[in-house]
Image (cartoon, coloured by chain):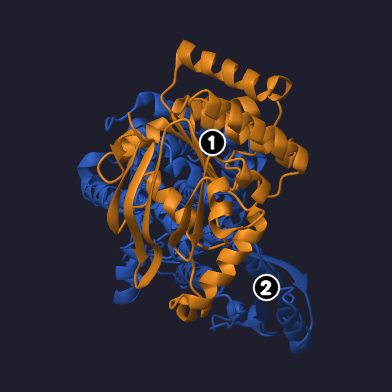
Amino acid sequence: MNLAIDCQGLVKRFGAYTAVQGVTFKIPPGTIMGFVGPNGAGKTTIIRMLCGVLVPTEGQATVLGFDVLTQPEEIKQRIGYMSQKFSLYEDLTVGENLDFYAGVYSLQGKTARAAKTQVIERIGLGDRTSQLVSSLSGGWKQRVALACALLHNPQLLILDEPTAGVDPVSRRVFWELIHQLAKEGMTVLVSTHYMDEAATCNFLGFVFYGRLIAFGSPEEMKKREAKDNLDDLFIYFVEHEASDDPRNRIIKKGGRG
Amino acid sequence: MRRFSWVRFTAVLKKEFLHILRDRASLVMAVAMPIGMLLLFGYAVNTDVEHLPTVVWDQSQTADSREFVTSVRNTQYLNPDNFVQGYKQIADYLDSGKARVAVIIPPNYGKNLQGNVQANVQVLVDGSDPTVARAAMSAVQMLGLNKSLQLQNERLVAMGTAGSIGTPLNIETRVWYNPDMKSLVFNIPALIGLILQNVIAMLTSFSIVREKERGTMEQLVVTPIRSLELLLGKLLPFVFIGFVSLSLILATGIFWFGVVPMGSIPLLVLLSTIFLVTILAIGLLISSIAKTQLQAMQMTFILILPSILLSGFIFPRETMPRLLQLLGGLLPLTYFLDIVRGIFLKGVGIQYLWQDTLTLCAFAIILLAIAAKKFKKNVE
């Protein structure tokens, strides 16, 4: 397999409103790709198209070598997804949540038990398996959600703002795990608002008003625009784009991304 | 890959049972609500009119007048326990609701009876509740008729006419199916339908709306799970709960209220299952429209009122205006009531119930198809 994600001119329109416009990028396996951009820029829409959940209006994309239009089932079986809201069942224990997702990914019997043990050890959930999810703190819920997404050993891990509202220590533990997974060959696609997180990605994409306005490694991008850090770069992009985007006037009246 | 996966289905099934076990409120609703509603409706929805408080102004104070009061009591419909003097006091009793019926016996009652002249008795009835008033009126009229026939006979005998003569016309009535005309016997079977509908529709819609509300549906969408697996996994536990509720209602009906089905219980269970499927579909439809559990609850309540009023649960559909009859015909409960009452009261089999059964099946198939399609659109 050559590329983990390969998308060519992805467009998504909701009625007359264009949420995503001509997004093109490629990432090789075993790398971490970060999406940054203001709220409502279209990050989640791009991610949902790559998951095979939303059908692109135009353009094409292959994820892990499968076409998002014709083979969404194959993609869904091979990706792990974790969203900004930790989508766990609060009235179930950690173990029961893991069991459910193991079943959903068609793991059973010995394989399911082995996968569960492995993921519990890896994330360090050992003594929490019998605890109800509702009794866990935000950081722990985030780890359990990650564990559920990793059970079936996905080739691509998609994280939609996984660290929003989580304390700095939990964030660092989380990112150490992500880097470890990438080192082992897993491809990671992550959207974030934290520039310190973005700086550690292999590739970065700036999403702005539905377009991918810049793509490359963090170092490359800083050099290209002659900025010292990503915060400055981000602010530069936002100000620059906002001033000459003709769609801006329409969007400001109340669009979404 | 596109095949129905047993592993995914059982994963959902297991999770749903855990939800139900953890959620005290729905457990209580599944067990306590049927019994609670049954007791409530069993005792409160009672149209049998008996022992109405009655006030008497006996101006005659004779053996004859006292005998009349006794025969009023013997009808079982009226309880002449209060004795007063004057219209003012009678008005007071009726106004305050302490009495529903007033019997006024004039001073010349005894004298007229003995003197072979027509005696009059006045009966005032509180007509605020037409059902009560109608029952009281017919009770006293029957009493009057019987009493005058009896007196006439006595007078004829006293006048020397040969022997006593019978009445020229005798109508013999016999009530079938519910010979004691107990409204309980009419209501308990119908409650099976009403309770199943309310409990199951609400619980089903809750279980799906909850996933939307908490955002877990968003997560399920990106997993390989198929809508049919999710749907069956979610509905099956409620079929189970439906059967638990059904058995509870049947047991309470039979052993507590003594309302025993005349017909076949297996047939009743079978047809209840078809009804249950239509109710699951209704719950599913509600969940595809409602965004929160509160909305789902409100929608279920919107369904409850017409199903009590229009389905024939209390009021006979035959006497309703055409439009309301048609509206009632849109409720699956209407047909199920015909079925349960048929089996419970008349003890009839499928040969008399096949039309209602077919209609119910049609409802089940159509509603389920629409609901499943809407559900699929939500998931994929």
Quick check: B92 above or below B129? Answer: below
Q: Residues within 10 Å of mark 1 (few under 14, many from 20)?
A: some
Q: Quadrant of the N terminus of chain B?
A: top left
- Is residue B179 something that shows in the picture? no
Specify the amino acid type for callout 2: Ser
Residue B368 image offset from top left, x and y in percent: 31, 48
- Chain A is shown in which shade? orange
Give the side of residue A87 with respect to residue B288, left or right: right
What letter labels the chain drawn in blue? B
Q: Quadrant of residue B327?
A: bottom left
Q: Helix, strand or loop at disc 1? A: helix
Q: Secondary structure at mark 2?
A: helix
Which amino acid, by three-letter code, is at mark 1? Leu
- Outermost top residue: A110
Foreground pick, B369 / B59? B369
From this view, report whether residue B100 is shown above or below residue A53.
below
**Residue B63, located in which quarter of the rendered image?**
bottom right
Separation of marks 2 and 1 at Cα, in angstroms: 52 Å
Residue drawn at x 56%, y 44% as measured from the top left: B34
Q: Chain of mark 1?
A: B
The percent position of residue B340, horizontal first and vertical second, equals 37, 46
Tell which tag, 2 or 1, sits nearer the viewer: 1
Residue B312 place in picture, x, y as percent: 39, 61
Residue B112 vs residue A69, the one in the foreground: A69
